[in-house]
Amino acid sequence: MKLTRRRFFNTTLATYLAVRSGRAFAAGSGMDFLSAREFGTLTAFVDTLIPADRYSPAASALGVPEAVVQSGKEDSDVERVIRAGCRWLDRSARSSGADGFAAVDEPGREAIVAAAAAGDARPLPKAFFRIVHQIAMRHYYAQTAAWSGLGYEGPPQPEGFMSFDRPPPSADR
Amino acid sequence: MSGEDFDVVVIGSGPGGGGCAWALARAGVRVLVLEAGPAYDYSSDYRLDREDWETSRFPLKEQAQGGYRIPRLQPLDPKWRSLRSWNALHGNVQGSAHRQGGSYWHVQGVGGSSLHFTGEAHRLHRESMKMRSRYGVGADWPFDYAELEPFYVRAERLLGVAGSGSSDARWRSRPYPLPAHALSYASRRLSTAFERNGLTLERNSLAILSKPSSRFPACNYCANCARGCPRGDKGTIDLRCIDPAVSTGRCTIRPLSRVIRLEPDGRDRIASVIYVDEKGVHRRVRGRAVVVACGAVQTPRLLLYSRGPAAPDGVANESGQVGRNFMETLFTIASGLHPEPLASYRGVPVDSVAWDFGAPDAIPGVIGGCRFSPGAAQAELLGPIAYATRLIGGWGHSHKARMRELFGHAVTVGAVGEWPANARSFVDLDPEEKDALGVPLARFHSHLEESDLDRLSFMMSKSRAVLEDSGVGEILEQFSSYDSVSATHVFGTCRMGVDARDSVVDGQCRSHRWRNLFVVDASVFPSTGGGEAPTLTIVALAIRAADHLRRLLRDRAL
């Protein structure tokens, strides 16, 4: 049994949509279902999930916002969650007096993201968090720029791991 | 539709079809191999050199999977809920009250499922071949281990098996062709925990080169056999059997050529084979003999669909056993994070195995054995994405810090066990769903009996105990057959036997009724063994059946 990406999405979406089934959403526009402002919100969100540090860049430097949008283009249910989630982030920020999520400082953004992750008995923020988190981590860690500090000697080929029977080399972690 | 003539038509190019084609072609027999799936180029199709290598599994090209469906399965008994598949971050893998049809992991292509296998090359425990007469369950093989042993020797040489040691249960007349692979650092660090739980790790016997051959390099220990080997150091059937067979000048391989029917004549022979070529054209081909080697799901599908006036219940189904006795993969996997850095993504995927409970009577209170192995590859915990999405929760700066702290610490204990045949596990033709050619899908009924759940419980308990003894603080993920089908090894649907009333083929893999029809794949297995991977046994059977077939051709007995 494998925890496939499709199984994860299906479970998360099913939970969210089962609660929201009575609401109608506007159909996605297809190519650009986020406004420029919403894309900025999404970017700030993924950069809070995966911020830059001295080892590796932030998520947006590695194309994560674009990857999230692409997932939305491929699945209309995911698109709806992404759009609704970005709007929720901005509403949450405005309720604290900020102009939008992207305008909040890092501690403030972290507090809003923590609320989304916790769910607080409302399905949308948690579904949005889970779906974007999954896409972000898959896309980010599929790039060598993200591997700095892990001590990872990959990709697996063409060199292989000929030191497999010895302790791992010490890494600057 | 014109016909072509060959000595032998082989349907399927996995371990059974490939092994057969190789042995026949070398012996001067003209062979046509019809393979429903595509060919793979090992030097360019497996992209483990890409930075996004982890985002996909084995690259399934078009037509690289046979058509099947898994219907609704049995309700889950809550008393076994400790066997539920779950992940600490995401909860239960499936939330249904029924066992769910996950996947039948296979490759339809030149080389078959050997293209994605982890190279394990096991001989059967000799006692596993006598399940009925010694233990009162299942069925006996119609011959004993001693009969098969010389063919194991030939199969090991053909595939290039690396191993060491011998045991009474799997005694050897020749040493392994290649020296065994070393254990990874991670496996060595776990060996003490295995021993404390009564499990002795032995180096696994693997069809993976431990020394370079004349054509291929030795393994470089990337742990990703399941994604396809881009070096040719893994003993896949395309490279070890099909290519050498073709180079004799007596073997023709046709990929993307799907056989849809066998055509019997009125004299208990298969007169011809109908297949659809890669352009979609229906073609007929004839052989003095026909070997069906499509695996335990697609072989019964073909035989049942070939029903007609001469074979109203399907070809070779006079006993009613085609599709019955279906056995699949009984497994458990448990994983956690070890306190020490191990770089556990390195090595061969399954470098060692504990056979202490491999005998049919080894598990207390349960008939049917099992085996245990370390190796994060069993749970596909080999790269940064797996850690970030399955093992290390959270986000932000703390998540990145934990990734740096814990990457490479994953440890997994996997167990595979015996699956005795039962009446509720079988393969039949789907009455509703058909594929694009109008052929009903194979319907894959899989049922666990109470004794299977007892065996699973033993496997999971011991696996968890090993992990906890190794220093893993918390089990972070477990999977088992209890709530999901995740079948890699499938068997039994055309079983061998002496009595034509309850078996499909005889001890030489020949149909009891259809004189020129052979089945050479794991369909013929009367038992699965206590967790042994079947590839080596299939190849040994294939070489043995080919030798017999060659004699029949020589003696004009077909």
Image (tube, coloured by chain):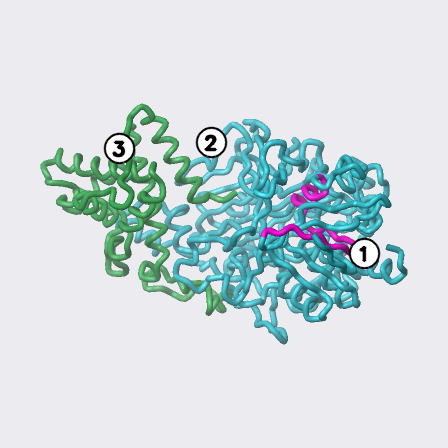
- State how far apart marks 3 and 2 are (Cα): 30 Å
What is chain A's hue in the picture? green
Query: Mark 2 = which residue?
Result: B95
- State how far apart marks 1 and 3 are (Cα): 65 Å
Q: Where is residue B478 drawn, in percent x and y? A: 50, 42
Image check: B524 left or right of B83?
A: right
Quadrant of the frame with the C terminus of chain B: bottom right
Q: Which residues are magenta?
A: B280-304
Query: Mark 1 = which residue?
Result: B288
> Amino acid under label 1?
Arg
Element carrying mark 3: loop
Name the residue nearer the viewer: B132 or B246: B246
Closer to viewer: mark 1 or mark 3 = 1
Mark toward the start of the polypeptide (2 vs 1): 2
Q: Where is residue B512 drawn, in percent x and y? A: 84, 44
Above or below A120: residue B9: below
Q: Where is residue B388 drawn, in percent x and y? A: 37, 50
Element carrying mark 2: loop
